[in-house]
Image (cartoon, grey):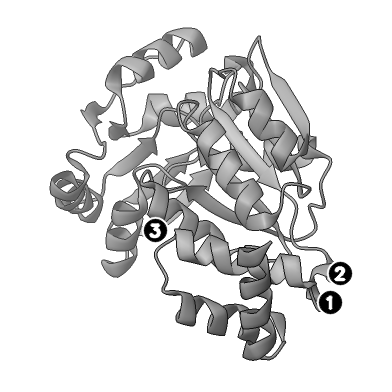
Amino acid sequence: MTGTLVLAGTPIGDVADAPPRLARELEEADVVAAEDTRRLRRLTQALDVRPRGRVVSYFEGNEAARTAELADALESGSRVLLVTDAGMPSVSDPGYRLVAEAVRRGVGVTAVPGPSAVLTALALSGLPVDRFCFEGFLPRKAGERRSRLREAEGERRTLVYFESPRRLAESLRTMAEVFGGERRAAVCRELTKTYEEVRRGPLEELAEWAAEGVRGEITVVVSGADESDGEEPDAAELARRVAVREEAGEHRKEAIAAVAQRSGVPKREVFDAVVAAKRG
């Protein structure tokens, strides 16, 4: 008989948010795989529980190598509990490889639902939540980051990103350039913690605010493209869209063709808009 893999959500800030089942699973699991065993120790002390099973580390550096070991334990009948530093395992955290391997081997997988930075930020943002896309962390390199954002330029669902406080201002500036500085957004900082803050406003305004320096865990929520964005853009907007693509490394000819196709206007019209912008 095979065991069971349990993915357990952990608090994203306030330890009082830990689901009651988490304590029981921590006590009863045969193996507890933790992203950071020191943080796990602090969590178990706060919950006043003592894991009876073996505790092992499972993080980005050893995830590939340790997956097979944990999968073998599951096949042998063990109940393996997987926890990360905060939130749900495998959501921008270690866990996907183990889940995929457990499924491949026919091992049961279940979860202890818990706090989610994505859903909490969405709920607090004041932006539409009926349809949304989770985009995870943006690339660190400027060109790759711009290209990733450009892919979502016309997305009408609300967008959710994780971001480092060190790169927040730069990412918000790039979002303003790609999506338009007037696009509504919310920066959610230190959710459920003592200094929780939700800053709402246009991307351009948020980029100026973030330039002063921001600390803590960051989740950014950006409204999707409006229905009006599907209307034919004016010449200035066409030229701006070409410029964004050129800055990301596209040749002008390809950028003009892409903007024309996406905007539903003739390539000649986009070309003329670019020429006019250069002259002006």
Q: Residue at x 66, y 20 (%)?
A: 192
The residue to which callout 1 is attached is: 231
Whole-Å distance between the Cαs marked 3 and 2? 46 Å
The residue to which callout 2 is attached is: 228
Q: Amino acid at mark 1?
A: Glu
Q: Residue at x 39, y 42 (%)?
A: 93
Point out which mark residue 144 bears: none
User: Closer to the camera: disc 3 or disc 2?
Assistant: 2
Q: Give the position of the N terminus as an image quadrant.
A: bottom left
Q: Is residue 32 above or below residue 92?
A: above
x then y, percent, for residue 171: 53, 41
Q: Amino acid at mark 2?
A: Ser
Whole-Å distance between the Cαs marked 3 and 1? 49 Å
The residue to which callout 3 is attached is: 108
Residue 9 visible at all:
no
How many marks overall? Answer: 3
x then y, percent, for residue 37: 28, 21
> What element does badge 2 sit on?
helix
Q: Residue at x 35, y 33 (%)?
A: 29
